[in-house]
């Protein structure tokens, strides 16, 4: 009877080891998928800049602020950009619309969201700053 008891314990440990190994493999696989998805986008924060379109799902989903995702589209031709100007302390996001003569809907949208047009800009564009936030 003792042999059966030892046998049951050994089989229980074997099943536990198999479950732990399987769980570890699953966790490593999920982490690898996550890393493969996010790594190229994280790399951009260190490299400097990236230009992308809304159809570039990974970049659009991970890099684009909700402010730009909800912004009115005033042209069929537009793209987004991300720039790391001087390290992680100064990151710039932008959207460019091509072939547009009236940016009024964008200006109204930004004003309604609490943003203010700046007199000076560190990049070749119009810069907006959230009211109540210092540069």
Image: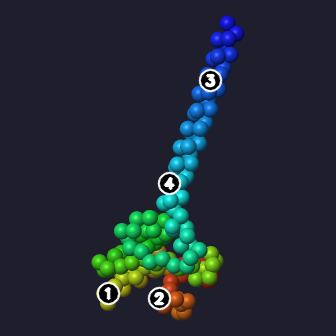
Q: Residue at x 63, y 78 (%)?
A: 87
* Residue 133 sits in quarter: bottom right
Q: Which mark sits nearer the N-terminus, 3 or 2?
A: 3
Precedes in sequence: disc 3 or disc 4: 3
Q: CA distance from mark 3 to mark 2?
A: 67 Å
Q: CA distance from mark 2 to mark 4?
A: 38 Å
Image quarter where the N terminus lies is: top right
Q: Coloring scheme of the render?
A: rainbow
Residue identified by numbered label 2: 126
Instruction: Classify 26 as above or below 10.
Output: below
Q: Is residue 120 positioned above or below 80 on the image?
A: below
Label 3 vs label 4: CA separation? 32 Å
Q: CA distance from mark 1 to mark 4?
A: 40 Å
Q: Label for residue 100? A: 1
Q: Is 114 or 60 nearer to us in this picture?
A: 60
Question: Circle 4 sits in a helix, a strand or a loop, which is it?
Answer: helix
Say whether residue 97 is visible. Answer: yes
Q: Which residue is mark 4?
A: 33
Residue bearing the label numbered 3: 12
* Residue at x-position 32% and y-position 90%: 101
Which secondary structure, mark 2? loop
* Pointer 1 or 2: first along the chain: 1
């Amino acid at each position: 009877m003792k042999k059966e008891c030892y046998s049951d314990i050994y089989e229980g440990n074997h099943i536990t080891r198999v479950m732990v190994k399987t769980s570890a493999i699953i966790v490593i696989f999920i982490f690898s998928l996550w890393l493969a998805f996010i790594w190229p986008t994280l790399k951009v924060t260190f490299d400097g800049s990236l230009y992308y379109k809304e159809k570039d799902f990974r970049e659009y989903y991970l890099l684009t602020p909700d402010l730009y995702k909800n912004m009115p589209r005033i042209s069929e031709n537009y793209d987004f950009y991300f720039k790391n100007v001087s390290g992680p302390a100064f990151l710039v996001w932008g959207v460019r619309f091509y072939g547009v003569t009236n940016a009024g809907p964008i200006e109204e949208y930004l004003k309604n969201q609490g943003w203010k047009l700046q007199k000076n800009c560190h990049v070749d564009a119009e810069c907006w700053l959230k009211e109540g936030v210092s540069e």
